[in-house]
Amino acid sequence: MNFASLPMYDLPELAAATGAWWAGIARHMQRAGIADVPDVCTAPDDLEQHWCSPGLLFSQTCGYPLTHRLNGKVQLLGLPVYACAGCDPDGFYSSMIIVPAASNLYSLADCRSSRAVYNTDDSMSGLLALRAAAAQQDAHADPFFRSLLRSGGHRRSLRAVADGEADVACIDAVTFALLSRIEPDVVSRVRVLGRSPKVPGLPYITSLTATAEQMERLRTALREAMADPGLSDARAELLLSGITFPDPAHYNVILELEAASSNLTLT
């Protein structure tokens, strides 16, 4: 039995659009000759186990897991393109470096010895983006931040900065754009200080067991879904504007950023 998921930008307010988007993808997968396409997405408790299962037909992950714990365990299917600030037509994206709107922080250098917050330890857009951006500042022997809080999600990190519980965070560009529409009152209480270095965005993946023929059928379905006029409303709601199919080696830039910033002490 195959299964699918769309866990990366799964905000509750977008559940209807996410469901419609998957229904459209599933329909095009069936037309492309893919067997055993699930009607609905699952919401797995253990994402790593879910992603590594031979029954995985389709999901989306972050670039950091792709280059680390999922390396050699899944296949890169495609790279969705998002239409918002901080995202490029080739699928590369950055994180928005945010501070409280009323703060006197006007550069990342000003954030030295401040309180930082991030989403999860395996996040390119939350933690590694923050580390890479800080590493671009002048080298300094002392820890860059006074404290570093793990929030558990980008939305929580943004709220922590808006509420004055933290001074700086990196928020995925797509998440920031979506929350700007969903929670404008919260977003209005933060200010974008800058952007982190750009990397390939959050990839669509499939099982390592998928054959070359199955991969091509899946990619055909994605091309058709991205061009389907009947899915335009769902795509617009999710900020989706296209699909690319990069060489997996493009994601090596994440490893390069990690290596370049490995000597930086955050706290």
Image: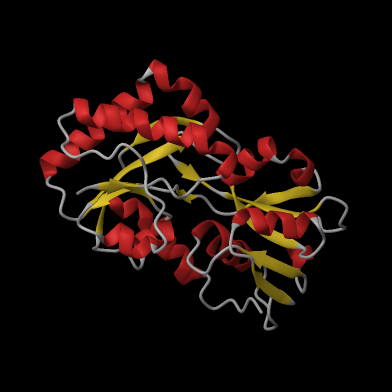
Image vertical order of residue 206 relative to residue 219, above or below: below
Residue drawn at point x = 62 percent, y = 53 percent: 171
Let me know if residue 183 appears in the view.
yes
The one of 121 and 233 positioned closer to us in this rendering? 233
Side (left or right) of 147 relative to 3: right
Where is residue 1 drawn, in percent x and y?
19, 49
Q: From this view, report whether residue 138 is shown above or below residue 60.
A: below
Left or right: 220, with 117 as reference point: left
Q: Residue at x 54, y 78 (%)?
A: 263
In-image side of 162 versus 89 (left or right): right
Q: Can residue 107 be seen by looking at this rendering?
A: no
Quadrant of the snapshot with the C terminus: bottom right
Q: Residue at x 47, y 68 (%)?
A: 258
Q: Residue furthest bottom?
A: 141
Q: Position of residue 99 (x, y in %)?
A: 76, 56
- Colour approach in the figure: secondary structure
Residue found at the very far top of the displayed protein: 229
The picture places residue 233, in percent across and down from the top left corner, at 50, 22
- From the top left corner, tell me how far across and down residue 28 is, in percent: 27, 27
Badge count = 0
